[in-house]
Each structure stands twice: as structure tokens, then as C-alpha cells.
Image: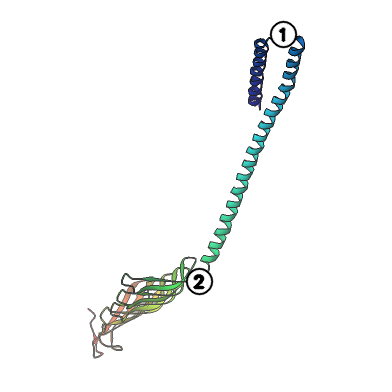
């Protein structure tokens, strides 16, 4: 405000000098005319001061209004972000079916997601169209029955999982279509209990019986294809 008053005072001085010059140039030497001009100056001075003060006050009000408007806009933007975040979270919490494709256009994966994590049944296919995986998930981790298949389509492994860890009885088969299979058992992801391994090209002719504890084999028995007990190699 002091700057505005200084500018106004400077203008008044310049105006006074101009009027005095005009008086001299026009030979306005009469006392009445001089007195009238000086009286006019006294009237003009307060008007100029008031005018400058009003301009200053108006500028300050505009500035204050601008700051208030900016503050309101920031609050509105903040509220909008909160609302968007809430809606986005709510949308993510909905069950969504997602599908991906191989470059050849065949289905690559399909499953349900909640909050961007696998939930429920999930399947995956090779680019040949052969099913590779089928299982259940909870919170993005394998939980429940899981099955894997070899590239020719026959079973590779099936069993139960808890939070991505194998638990309980499993069936594990060789990569060859008619290869041997194993009846296995896991405890907290480690081999445990009795494992039964069958001869190739058979479903019920036992080849080996292995016993595990804490992922370590503690005993083993073996039979030939005719059921005769043989030495384990």
C-alpha cells in the first residue's frame, strides 16, 4: 500500500508543477485565479489518493479471491482423487474374467481375478491348443486341486496345494505318454510317507516302494514286472 501512496504523491507533485507552469505561461498573476487553482489542487489531491487506495484494495481483493479460488480447486481435485481411488478399489474388488491370446490367436490363459490376483478356476494353454494347467487359486496363490499336462496332452502331475505349497497325495507321471507314474505324498512341500512307482506301460504293476521322512528316503523296495522282489538299483 505504501508503494501505491508514494506513486500517487509523485503524480500530485508533477501535477502541481504543471499547473504552476501553466500559470506562469499564461500570465495568470491575479490573486483570485491563483487562489482558485490552488484550491482546485487541494480538491484533486484527496481524489487521487482515494483512487489509488481503491485500486490497491481492489488488487488485494482480487489476489485474495484468486488464492481462495485456487485453494477451493485444490480441495475439489483432492476429493475427486479420493472418489476415483475408492471407485477403482471397488472395481478391482469385483470378480473379473481375463483372457490372453497367443500370437497365433489361440487362447493362452483364462481365469478369474479379484484385486488383480488370481481367484478361483484358472486355465492355461500351449500355442498348439493343448491344455497345460488347470487349477484353483485364492488371493493369487494356488489353493486346492491343481493339474499340469505334458505337451502331448497327457497328465504330468495332479494334487492339492495350499498357498503354492504341495500338500497331501499327488500323482506324478513321466513325460512319455505311456511312461511310469508315481503315487506320491507331500507334507508342507516336502516328500513324506510312502511313494509308489509303477512300471512303464502299466497301471498297477508296482516297481518301487519308497518311504520318506522330512524329504529324505529312509527305505526302498523293488519288484520286476512279474511281481518278483528284486534288488533296487
Q: Nearer the viewer, mark 2 or mark 1?
A: 1
Q: How many marks?
A: 2
Residue 31, compared with residue 102, is above or below; it is above
Report helix, strand or loop for mark 1: loop
Viewed as shown, does residue 98 lie left or right of 212? right
Quadrant housing the N terminus:
top right
Work out whether mark 2 precedes mark 1 in sequence or the reverse, and give the earlier one: 1
Instruction: Report the front residue among 127 and 226.
Output: 127
Q: Do labels 2 and 1 touch, CB within 8 Å?
A: no
Position above or below: 57 against 30: below
Q: Which residue is mark 1?
A: 29
Q: Report helix, strand or loop for mark 2.
A: loop
Residue pointed to by mark 2: 95
Q: Residue at image x 58%, y 55%? A: 80
Q: Identify which residue is drawn at 74% across, 21% down.
A: 43
Q: x, y (%) of residue 137?
A: 45, 72
Determine crowd level at label 2: few under 14, some 14-19, many 20+ residues with C-alpha closer than 10 A: some
Q: Is residue 164 left or right of residue 202?
A: right
x and y percent of residue 95 in the render?
50, 71
Q: Quadrant of the C terminus?
A: bottom left
At a point 73% along the width and 12% down the height, the residue shown is 34
Q: Relative to 51, does residue 121 appear above or below in the rendering? A: below
Q: Give the side of residue 21 with respect to residue 128, left or right.
A: right
- Residue in front for this viewpoint, 32 or 203: 32
What distance separates the C-alpha of mark 2 from that of mark 1? 98 Å
Render colour scheme: rainbow
Q: Position of residue 42 (x, y in %)?
A: 74, 19
Q: Position of residue 186 (x, y in %)?
A: 39, 75
Amino acid at each position: 500500500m505504501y508503494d501505491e501512496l508514494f506513486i500517487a504523491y509523485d503524480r500530485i507533485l508533477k501535477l502541481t508543477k504543471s499547473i504552476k507552469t501553466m500559470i506562469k505561461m499564461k500570465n495568470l498573476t491575479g490573486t483570485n485565479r491563483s487562489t482558485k487553482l490552488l484550491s482546485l489542487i487541494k480538491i484533486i489531491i484527496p481524489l487521487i489518493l482515494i483512487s489509488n487506495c481503491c485500486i490497491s484494495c481492489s488488487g488485494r481483493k482480487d489476489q485474495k479471491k484468486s488464492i481462495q479460488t485456487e485453494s477451493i480447486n485444490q480441495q475439489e481435485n483432492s476429493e475427486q482423487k479420493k472418489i476415483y481411488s475408492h471407485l477403482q478399489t471397488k472395481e478391482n474388488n469385483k470378480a473379473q474374467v481375463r483372457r490372453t491370446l497367443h500370437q497365433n490367436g489361440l487362447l493362452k490363459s483364462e481365469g478369474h481375478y479379484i484385486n488383480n490376483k488370481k481367484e478361483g478356476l484358472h486355465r492355461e494353454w500351449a500355442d498348439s491348443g493343448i491344455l497345460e494347467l488347470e487349477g484353483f487359486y485364492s488371493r493369487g496363490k494356488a489353493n486346492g486341486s491343481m493339474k499340469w499336462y505334458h505337451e502331448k496332452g497327457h497328465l504330468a502331475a495332479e494334487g492339492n496345494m495350499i498357498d503354492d505349497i504341495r500338500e497331501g497325495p499327488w500323482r506324478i507321471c513321466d513325460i512319455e505318454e505311456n511312461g511310469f507314474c508315481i503315487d506320491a505324498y507331500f507334507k508342507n512341500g516336502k516328500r513324506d510317507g510312502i511313494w509308489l512307482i509303477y512300471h512303464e506301460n502299466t497301471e498297477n504293476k508296482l516297481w518301487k516302494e519308497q518311504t520318506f521322512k522330512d524329504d529324505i528316503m529312509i527305505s526302498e523296495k523293488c519288484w520286476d514286472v512279474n511281481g518278483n522282489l528284486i534288488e533296487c538299483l
